[in-house]
Image (cartoon, coloured by chain):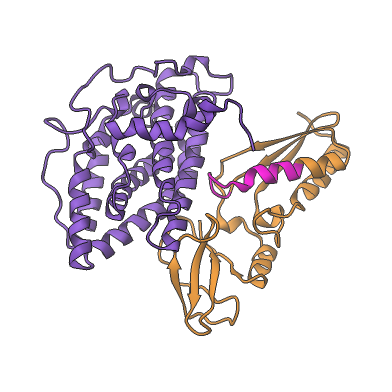
Amino acid sequence: MTAPTGTHRTDASAPPSAGAPTPEAASSTTATDPAISAAALALGDDALVLSHRLGEWAGHAPVLEEEVALANIALDLLGQARILLSQVGDEDELAYLREERAFRNLQLVEQPGGDFAHTIARQLYFSTYQALLYAELARTEGPFTALAAKAVKEVDYHRDHAEQWTLRLGDGTVESHTRMQRAVDALWRYTGEMFQPIDGITATHGINWTALQELWDTSIGETLRGATLTVPETPRSDGWTAGGGRQGLHTEPFGRMLAEMQHLHRSHPGATW
Amino acid sequence: MVTTPVESRLEEHLKELAGSVPDPELPMITLAELGVVRGVHITGPGSVEVELTPTYTGCPAVETMTADIETVLHEHGMPEVSVRRVLTPAWSTDDITDEGRRKLAASGIAPPRPGATHGPVPLTLAVRCPHCGSTDTELLSRFSSTACKALRRCVACREPFDHFKEL
């Protein structure tokens, strides 16, 4: 199903290629430092791809309130993605005309929704990461301070949503507990990648990625234990784990997702409504 | 740019006009009452720049707000209007004016509680039902009809209602 691209580690911070608009082609209002552009692309792609994955629940969520919640979270992420991608170049070209290998998102966010437990586990892992990272970006002075200060307040709601559902599903029925544990285990191997340093923000905001991972481990451990779930002990960095999204290596489901996301724009260039 | 007294009076007038535009999703309140019009600057003869801040980064109403501001300022004789989106300082529900809060409540939307600085921190102040005034209300969902609202229900009168959640 979700065959990870494996342990490849190639040219870590190379800018996107493969027919994509490069940061150098950006207009005068965009970031000019290539490392900062690459960082904006990484954070922007995380938000864009997860936004699309959450949007796939429209019409399928278990209850109406959840449908509305997931759509609202997707909308927040899309707003963040638009601001970040606009710092790199034309947001529409970047979203709709790049090939798979030019995307710099984490492999975690491109994983299919699966059952509702998988979607919640993906939300829990990512929103905790995003909330911790953006809080640091907002606290320190650098190119992402303004956006992070704005977005972190939204992301706190996303994190709260995921934590509440993890508690309800984990400490719910036998069936919900089994499914939530399965989801937490299945996505664990994608979590190590989150703490690969993004050069453009390490340099400008002084992010300590080891400290970030410790905060994440503590928070996730507390939530999972509170939900009567077991914290996975399988590897999530080095060895046979996922990773490579930040270098443009993606898992099989991502290509199919992009095909759907980009189809309209590519088939009908310039279409409006 | 040095502003002459005439220009600053004009800026004030144009800011009032821009601020009088109703919010597209909450038409009972104006953009000034929502606290999203940050500034209006004359940038040349017949040319004005409006600073607008979004409530949520993904708020789809921003484009409609922009178009509505342009329309109203064009109608009042400004041929060149540019609306610039500003993020700093980040908008907070504390930017909603008292009059805005009153109008929200009058329309059945519980206004945000004051002093909320950061996310879903549990606050001790209860959310009051906009229908019967009871403070005995419960959360149904943190997300409701728009990004900025949560869905609650009044335990006393059993009516569900929207709550403009703190941000």
Name the foreground residue: A222 vs A170.
A170
Q: Is residue A195 above or below residue B31?
A: above
Total marks drawn?
Answer: 0
| Viewport quadrant of the N terminus of chain B | top right
Please provide percent x and percent y for residue A234. 11, 42
* The residue positioned farthest toward the bottom in the image shown: B156
Q: Does the stretch in magenta take in B57?
A: yes
From the viewer's perspective, is B124 left or right of B32?
left
Specify the colour of chain A.
purple
Q: Estimate the x, y position of residue B23 in percent, counting from the top left.
A: 69, 54
Q: Nearer the viewer, residue A99 or B155?
A: A99
| Left-right relation of A261 to B148 | left
Colour used to depict chain B in the structure image = orange
Q: Is residue A263 visible?
A: yes
Residue, x 48% and y 56% (percent of image)?
B117
**On screen, B143 above or below A202?**
below
**In the image, residue B68 lies in the stretch drawn in magenta:** yes
Res A206 seen here: no
In the image, B140: left or right of B12?
Answer: left
Q: Examine the rendered structure and indicate whether residue B100 appears above or below residue A76.
A: below
- Where residue A38 sits, quadrant-wise, is top left
Residue at the far front in the pictured view: A267
Secondary structure mostly seen in magenta is helix
State which quadrant residue A168 falls in.
Answer: bottom left
Would residue B101 appear left or right of A53 to someone viewing this image? right
Q: Which residues are magenta?
A: B55-69
Q: Position of residue A271 (x, y in %)?
A: 61, 31
Which residue lies at the image location 31% right of the left edge and 27% below the top edge?
A246
The percent position of residue A30, horizontal first and vertical second, equals 54, 23
Residue that appears at 43% across and 24% down: A36
